[in-house]
Amino acid sequence: MKHYEVEILDAKTREKLCFLDKVEPHATIAEIKNLFTKTHPQWYPARQSLRLDPKGKSLKDEDVLQKLPVGTTATLYFRDLGAQISWVTVFLTEYAGPLFIYLLFYFRVPFIYGHKYDFTSSRHTVVHLACICHSFHYIKRLLETLFVHRFSHGTMPLRNIFKNCTYYWGFAAWMAYYINHPLYTPPTYGAQQICQLGNFSIHMALRDLRPAGSKTRKIPYPTKNPFTWLFLLVSCPNYTYEVGSWIGFAIMTQCLPVALFSLVGFTQMTIWAKGKHRSYLKEFRDYPPLRMPIIPFLL
C-alpha cells in the first residue's frame, strides 16, 4: 500500500511547519491534525484549520486524504483559529447568566432599588408572569443544550463567550430592571403569546436528523408534530418561533428594553437564517423551492 507524505505550511508566511512521512492513504484530516499536534502541542486539533489553498476553505475533519485532489506528496496550509471553547460551555454560560440576573431583580435584592424595597414583591400579576416566562425560556435553553442539541462543530473561538455574554446578560439586566421596578406600570392592553413549545419542537426535529456522534446533514421536513409544519414555509422555524416568543413578551410587558432586545435578536437570527438557507440550497439540489429563511413568503 502506497503511503503519503504530508507537508504542512503556514498559510500566511508559507513557512514549513511540519513534514509527516508514511501517512496512511485512508487517514482523515482529524488524524492529520492529531499528528500535527504532536510536533506543535500549542495548536491542539480544535484550533487548527487545514486547507488545500492558503485562501481556500477549511477541510472537514472527516475528509480522507486519498480522496482529496492531491498527489502522494500533499501540501496543506495551516491557519491558527485562536483559543477555542466548547459550544456547550458557551451556551450554558450565556443562558445561565440571564436566568440568574433576572431573578436578582425580581426578588429585589439589596442595592438595586433602594433599601425600602429590599426583597419586596410586586403587586402586578404581569410582573410575576413575566418572570415565569423569562425563567422558563432560559431553563428550556439550558436543558436543550444538555440533552437536545447536537453540534456539527465542537468548539468556537474563545472571544465569542465574552461577546455573547455581554449581549445576553446586558439585555437581561436592562429589561429586568424596568419590569421589576417598584414604579413599573403594567400595560393596559396586550396579550401573552408563547412560542416556546414550537421552538422546542423544531429543536427536537433537528436533533433527530443527526445521529449521535455524527455530522450528517439532511433536509429537515415536518413531522407528525404540528409545530414542525412551519418547515413547509421556512428553513429555520426555530428562529421564527424564537422571534415570536420575544414579540409576545414585549407585548405582554410593554417594556422598551424587551422590544429592543427582540429587534436585535430578530436582526441576528435573520442573518443566521439566511446563511443556513443558502447552505441548504447549495448542498441539496432537491431543496424545497417555496421555503424562505425565517418569515413565510417574505424573508
Image (cartoon, rainbow, N blue to C red):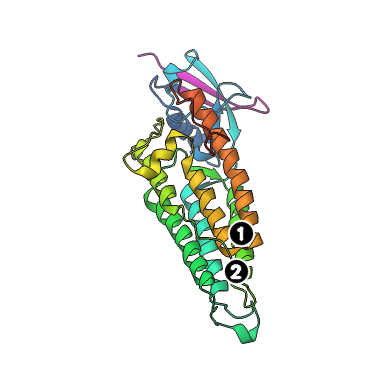
Q: How many marks?
A: 2
As helix, strand or loop, the secondary structure at mark 1 comes to helix
Asked if one can make out residue 244 in the rendered structure from this viewpoint, the answer is yes
**What is the residue that sits farthest to the left in this orientation?**
224
Residue 270's quadrant in the figure? Answer: top right
Segment colored magenta = 1-21
Q: Is residue 54 left or right of residue 103?
A: right
Report the amino acid beneath label 1: Val
The residue at the point 61 percent across, 44 percent down is: 268
Residue 185 or 148: which is nearer the viewer?
Answer: 185
**Disc 2 to disc 1, C-alpha distance:** 9 Å
Residue 9 drawn at (x, y percent): 60, 25
Residue 13's quadrant in the figure? Answer: top right
Residue matched to label 2: 179
Asked if one can make out residue 154 in the rendered structure from this viewpoint, the answer is no
Disc number placed over residue 258 in the picture, else none: 1
Q: Is residue 154 left or right of residue 207?
A: right
Reply yes or no: does residue 233 show up in magenta: no
Residue 127's quadrant in the figure? Answer: bottom right
Residue 82 vs 61, above or below: the answer is: below
Residue 287 or 127: which is nearer the viewer?
Answer: 127
Residue 47 drawn at (x, y percent): 54, 39
As helix, strand or loop, the secondary structure at mark 2 comes to helix
